[in-house]
Image (spheres, helix red, strand yellow):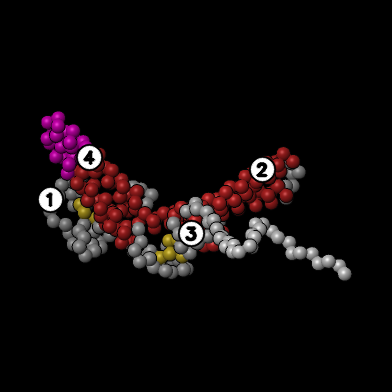
């Protein structure tokens, strides 16, 4: 990373925005100073968490290399790697801070994070960046598989409280969709191919079994895998007798 030769400017070199209160621009070139948003945008990665992790991993590798160089007597290389490690560590922290600031303004709909243009609004009070981006991913996968409404309905009906329960609810929705689509395809097959119809029905049966197994697993997660056993105590006094089981009423004698 380039050495800092002068004080940072008042605004970002790329977007011309001033940094937030308490933040400074980060130098990525001789005269290139970026804000956290632009630094995040230029960093490779699918989401903010992976971008921050990329810089953090580079920092750890460079610190390890610096230690090896120092042990080998290569002091100049050790200093250079240590400086780069510090820069990457600082960049990772800036990207995470930027992501957490965005997460605090995230809105949710039906228990999942949605873009700011969403139609349901319920601002999160203390969101976690990884949880928000995971929610975005779940929503995107529901959309790709065309089960957004079904997946959210299953999740809401099951009162899914955490990521595990929501993932299971979405998997149940996908399995249900595939099962019924394959059943319909077998019923309306215009080629009259019995072998293909049988394959479709086998797939449908497997998806139905997977959906039902997912429901059982979801129930175990929500109940902690525990079973409730009801014990009833019967008190017998005097010469009374207790009978366990179903007892039929006495039959009346015909006159």
For the residue carrying disc 2, how many other residues have a C-alpha within 10 Å: few (<14), some (14-19), or many (20+)?
A: some
Q: Quadrant of residue 81?
A: top left
Q: Nearer the viewer, residue 36 or 252?
A: 252
- Disc 2 to disc 4, how far (Cα)? 54 Å
Q: CA distance from mark 3 to mark 1?
A: 53 Å
Residue 119 included in the magenta stretch of the image: no
Nearer to the camera, 16 or 40? 40
User: How far apart, in angstroms, are the residues tagged by discs 1 and 2?
Assistant: 69 Å
Instruction: Tell me if 32 is positioned left or right of 48 in this view.
Output: left
Residue 40 position, x and y percent, is 30, 53
Q: Earlier in the sequence, mark 1 or mark 4?
A: 1
User: Is 101 drawn above or below residue 207 in the view shown?
Assistant: below
Q: Secondary structure at mark 2?
A: helix
Q: Position of residue 181 (x, y in %)?
A: 64, 51
Residue at the (17%, 59%) spot, across then down: 9
- Asked if residue 73 is among those painted magenta in the image, a careful observer would answer yes
What residue range appears in magenta? 62-83
Magenta stretch mostly in which secondary structure? helix
Mark 1: give few (<14), some (14-19) or many (20+) Cα within 10 Å: few
Check if mark 1's residue and mark 4's residue have beta carbons within 8 Å. Answer: no
Q: Which mark is residue 94?
A: none
Residue located beneath label 4 in the image: 62
- Which mark's residue is nearer the viewer, 3 or 4? 3
Q: Are marks 1 and 2 in contact (CB under 8 Å)?
A: no
Mark nearest the camera among 3 and 1 is 3
Report if the CB atoms under discs 3 and 4 are less than 8 Å apart: no
Query: Would you name the residue on which mark 3 appears?
Result: 160
Question: How far is the residue under mark 3 from the one under mark 2?
Answer: 30 Å
Relative vertical location of residue 60 with respect to residue 111 in this rendering, above or below: above
Along the line of sight, the residue nearer the viewer: 125 or 158: 158
Task: Determine which of the numbered discs, if any, sits on residue 202 in the image.
Answer: 2
């Amino acid at each position: 990373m380039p050495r800092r030769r002068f004080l940072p400017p008042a605004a970002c070199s790329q977007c011309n925005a001033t940094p937030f209160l308490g933040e400074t621009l980060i130098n990525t070139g001789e005269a290139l100073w970026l804000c956290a948003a632009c630094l995040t945008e230029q960093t490779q990665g699918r989401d903010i968490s992976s971008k921050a992790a990329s810089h953090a991993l580079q920092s750890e590798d460079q610190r390890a290399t610096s230690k090896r160089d120092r042990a080998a007597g290569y002091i100049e290389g050790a200093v250079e790697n240590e400086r780069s490690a510090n820069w990457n560590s600082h960049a990772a922290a800036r990207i995470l801070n930027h992501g957490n600031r965005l997460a605090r303004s995230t809105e949710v709909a039906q228990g999942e994070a949605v873009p700011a243009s969403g139609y349901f609004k319920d601002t999160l009070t203390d969101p976690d960046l990884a949880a928000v981006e995971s929610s975005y991913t779940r929503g995107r996968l529901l959309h790709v598989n065309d089960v957004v409404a079904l997946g959210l309905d299953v999740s809401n009906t099951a009162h899914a409280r955490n990521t595990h329960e929501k993932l299971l609810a979405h998997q149940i929705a996908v399995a249900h969709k595939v099962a019924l689509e394959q059943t319909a395809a077998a019923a309306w097959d215009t080629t009259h191919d019995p072998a293909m119809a049988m394959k479709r029905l086998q797939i449908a049966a497997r998806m139905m079994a997977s959906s039902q197994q997912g429901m059982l697993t979801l129930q175990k997660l929500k109940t902690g895998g525990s079973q409730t056993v009801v014990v009833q105590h019967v008190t017998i006094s005097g010469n009374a007798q207790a009978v366990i089981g179903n007892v039929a009423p006495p039959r009346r004698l015909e006159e």
